[in-house]
Amino acid sequence: MRLILIGYRGTGKTTVARRVAELLELECFDADVELERLAGKSIKQIFADDGEQAFRDLEVQVIGDLVQRPDAVLSLGGGAIMREETRLAIAPGTVIWLTAKPETIHARMISDTKTSEQRPNLTTSGGLAEITLLLTQREPVYRACADVIVETDAKSAEQVAQEIVCLVK
């Protein structure tokens, strides 16, 4: 069983993936963590040093390697599915889209120190405006990729993980 969690940053992909993996006794991999390990620097630093294109190229490589693992839960970066290579690579797995309202995502990002320290703004606007803009662009792609959609607003990571386990068992 290969489960792949997609969605905007702040929807709980990393935390939920870990818990789902525990519940199903599978390995868990976070594409962003693996990418940072391979690059030897944070995502924010990759963007600053090499640009978004180089980051996305490395992301495709990492995800291509991760999807070879047969029994695992994978958590992808929020923009990963915007590349066709990634969409094709994840298609054989069960793709689970974690959703949340822009306001929920913004509140979660503000409370997460990793977001500001390690994650770059992806537009000049930043904040809620950036989230709203990028969600508008990405939602049709998330929807097209998703086998399962799980709303995360007003739910704990444990509740979301339990819901996913019930849906995939």
Image: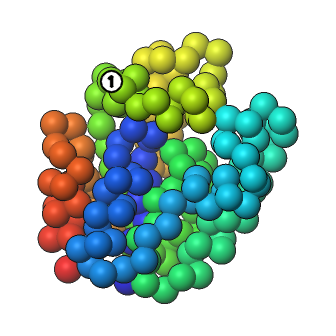
x%, y% of residue 159? 15, 54
Residue 53 sits in quarter: top right
Residue located at (84% from left, 39% from top): 50
Q: Nearer the viewer, residue 9 or 136?
A: 9
Residue 106 sits in quarter: top left
Q: Is residue 160 left or right of residue 61?
A: left
Task: Name the kind of residue labelled 1 in the image.
Answer: Ala
Query: Could one spot residue 60 in this view of the protein?
Result: no
x%, y% of residue 22? 29, 72
Q: Which residue is mark 1?
A: 107
Q: How many marks?
A: 1
Q: Which SS class for mark 1?
A: helix
Model colouring: rainbow
Quadrant location, the C terminus: bottom left
Residue 64 sits in quarter: bottom right
Dot 1: within a 10 Å radius of its alpha carbon, few (fewer than 14), some, or many (20 or more) residues? few
x%, y% of residue 38? 73, 61
Whether 48 is drawn above or below 94: the answer is: above
Q: Nearer the viewer, residue 134 or 3?
A: 3
Whether 141 is drawn above or below 91: the answer is: above
x%, y% of residue 105? 35, 30
